[in-house]
Image: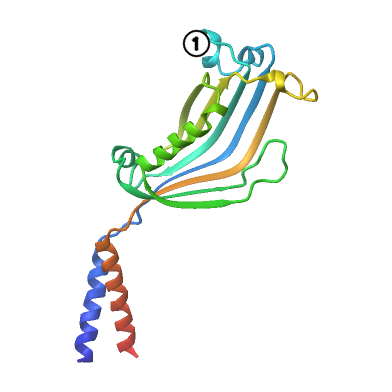
């Protein structure tokens, strides 16, 4: 009887071992952040500091007094789900994990604490949360923001991204100790990561549990 149970358990473990399995996850990593923040009380920050020409008056039809830029390196792991899988299936639930470390705040020497956040949701759920935030806090964000985003690939799955934006802010409210025009640069060793994984299906969980039971039986009858 023991030999029969041992043989059945061994066969079950071997069958589960032979089932094809890949560690599935879409992963996007960003690092090596750098950028600038500029403002000009005269109302033409793009021209004053020779910034992104795509945001100047000739292209946007409006002058801006505040501008910012951000550059970072990125790398992604092509797997399942792909970017297209996520975008084309907005109702499919995924396990999202967001993590960040070494985030630095301008004019501060101490980085923010590292954090990791995981949540099960669909892309539609994520976008609903984004829309809620925009509705709740949109009054603090200028409506006339112009931006430009582009990237350059440095390898099959890596590259460098560039983001520049400009808008208008009430610079007359600046404290007297802050100049009415200025240009600041910053560098940050922050690491940001977004991972999107498929939610395990019930059949997968049953197979995993059965396999673990088989391993336990094998170990028991080997004693």
Of 71 and 156, the residue lying toward us = 71
The C terminus sits in image quarter: bottom left
Q: Is residue 108 visible?
A: yes
- Left or right of 63? Residue 131 is left
Residue in view at x 63 percent, y 39 percent: 188
Pick the residue in front: 142 or 19.
Answer: 142
The local secondary structure at tag 1 comes to helix
Image quarter for residue 213? bottom left
Q: Can residue 157 be seen in this view?
A: no
Which residue is at 49% across, 46% downward?
A: 193
Q: Residues within 10 Å of mark 1 (few under 14, many from 20)?
A: few
Residue at x 48% of width, y 26% of height: 149
Return the residue nearer the eye: 172 or 120: 172
Q: Which colour scheme is used?
A: rainbow
Measured as percent of width and height from the top left, residue 34 is found at: 61, 33
Examine the rendered structure and indicate whether residue 81 appears above or below residue 143. Answer: below
Q: Is residue 119 above or below residue 142?
A: below
The residue to which callout 1 is attached is 59
Q: Which quarter of the rendered picture does the N terminus lie within? A: bottom left
Q: Answer with left or right where residue 222 lies relative to residue 46.
A: left
Q: Which of 53 and 152 is in front in this view?
A: 53
Q: What is the x, y in percent for residue 12?
A: 23, 75
Residue 179, position as x, y percentages in the image: 76, 21
Residue 166 left/right relative to 206: right
Vertical position of residue 80 compared to residue 19: above or below: above
Q: Quadrant of residue 35?
A: top right
Q: How many labels does the image show?
A: 1
| Farthest right residue in view | 177
Q: Residue 85 in the image: x percent, y percent?
A: 30, 42
């Amino acid at each position: 009887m023991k030999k029969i149970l041992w043989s059945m358990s061994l066969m079950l473990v071997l069958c589960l071992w032979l089932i094809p399995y890949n560690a599935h996850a879409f992963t996007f990593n960003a690092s090596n952040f750098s950028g600038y923040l500029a403002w000009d009380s005269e109302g033409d920050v793009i021209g004053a500091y020779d910034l992104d020409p795509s945001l100047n008056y000739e292209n946007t039809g409006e002058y801006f007094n505040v501008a910012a830029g951000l550059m970072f390196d990125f790398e992604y792991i092509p797997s399942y789900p792909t970017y297209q899988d996520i975008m084309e299936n907005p109702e499919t639930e995924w396990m999202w994990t967001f993590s960040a470390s070494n985030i630095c705040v301008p004019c501060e020497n101490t980085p923010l604490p590292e954090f990791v956040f995981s949540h099960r949701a669909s892309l539609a759920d994520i976008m609903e949360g984004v829309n809620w935030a925009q509705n709740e806090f949109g009054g603090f964000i200028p409506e006339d923001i112009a931006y430009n985003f582009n990237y350059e690939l440095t390898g099959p799955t890596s590259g460098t991204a560039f983001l520049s934006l400009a808008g208008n802010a009430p610079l007359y409210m600046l404290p007297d100790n802050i100049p009415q025009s200025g240009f600041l640069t910053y560098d940050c060793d922050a690491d940001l990561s977004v991972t999107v994984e498929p939610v395990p299906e019930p059949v997968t969980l049953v197979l995993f549990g059965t396999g673990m039971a088989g391993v336990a039986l094998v170990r028991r009858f080997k004693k």
